[in-house]
Amino acid sequence: MTTQSAQQRRAEERIVYDAFLAVCPTRQVLATVGDKWSSLLITALSDGSRRHSQLRTQIGGISQKMLTQTLRELERDGLVRRTVTLQVPVRVDYELTALGQTLVPVLRALKDWSETHIGEVLAARERYDGAT
Amino acid sequence: MTTQSAQQRRAEERIVYDAFLAVCPTRQVLATVGDKWSSLLITALSDGSRRHSQLRTQIGGISQKMLTQTLRELERDGLVRRTVTLQVPVRVDYELTALGQTLVPVLRALKDWSETHIGEVLAARERYDGAT
DNA sequence: CGGTATCCCGGTGGATACTG
DNA sequence: CAGTATCCACCGGGATACCG
């Protein structure tokens, strides 16, 4: 049936496309950098190690679930190191790895751009929204 | 009722937090840069203007809805300029504004970091996943 | 050609409660 | 203190159909 094969072809294109995305380094890193919490955590850790509870306070607004989940992902990607000290109660410290630290300047560049140009962006929005 | 006031207090904290986020320039820009399609579009436009249909082909995999929606947001933020030429059928061109062009080097820095370090990230993942 | 409008599914992430 | 488990509301975004 031609209908079926058309659908299949679309499905295949979809797979090829997804594969392309999965392989693209920039997209993968963007998934981390663009994440709502990842960049905040990396920034928070950029000047030394922090404990779970410290991060929870410092970030303020992050749920326990997302804090743990995001830290796990960063650890998995080799950007953050997790150190458990066995005592009662248990103590857990997080710090940037050498790899994680190389990301800090890039995030800082993004931060600089933001602070430099946010005024223009906001002005553009007002213009756009004001023009009905 | 104490229960009510506790809920209200939590609601207020939530608002304060959201306000903080809304005001933070970095978070706002991150919302653009981290967006799945925005950065791809800016990159696609970095070497000249493109038509709607060209972008649709070039990006490949983006739905019409998201293409239009993302372009509107970029236009609203003053990063992209939309030019309509009245003819039949209508012709629409998109190009980066001067502001949009200042974002290109930042995205390129991100791209460079990605291509340089993606190997280490992937290796870290294998180690992490392999260690049961 | 370049949209807009509508429906709807699946993933994201917050709230809550429990464990070592 | 740090983490896991469960439930579920929300909305991002794909598919589809129709306009100027």
Image (cartoon, coloured by chain):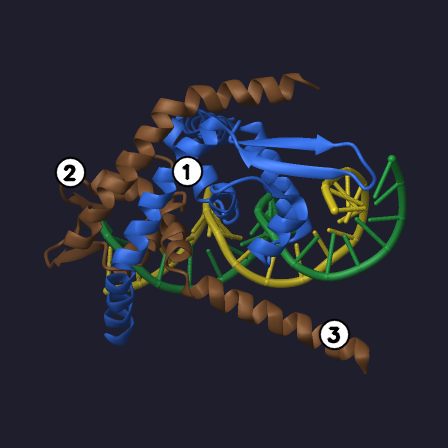
Chain colours: A brown, B blue, C yellow, D green
Above or below, A45 relative to B129: above
Q: Secondary structure at mark 3?
A: helix
Q: Write down the chain letter for disc 3.
A: A
Q: Position of residue C13 (x, y in %)?
A: 46, 47
Circles 3 and 1: CB atoms closer than 8 Å? no
Labels 3 and 2 within one chain: yes
Label 1: which residue? B30
Front one among A44 and B63? B63
Camera-side mark, 1 or 2: 1
Q: Write down the chain letter for disc 1.
A: B
Label 2: which residue? A47
In the displayed structure, does residue A124 sit left or right of residue C3? left
Q: Position of residue A110 (x, y in %)?
A: 33, 36
Q: Residue at x 25, y 39 (%)?
A: A43
Q: Secondary structure at mark 2?
A: loop
Above or below, B85 relative to C1: above
- The numbered dot on residue A6 is 3
Mark nearer the N terminus (3 vs 2): 3
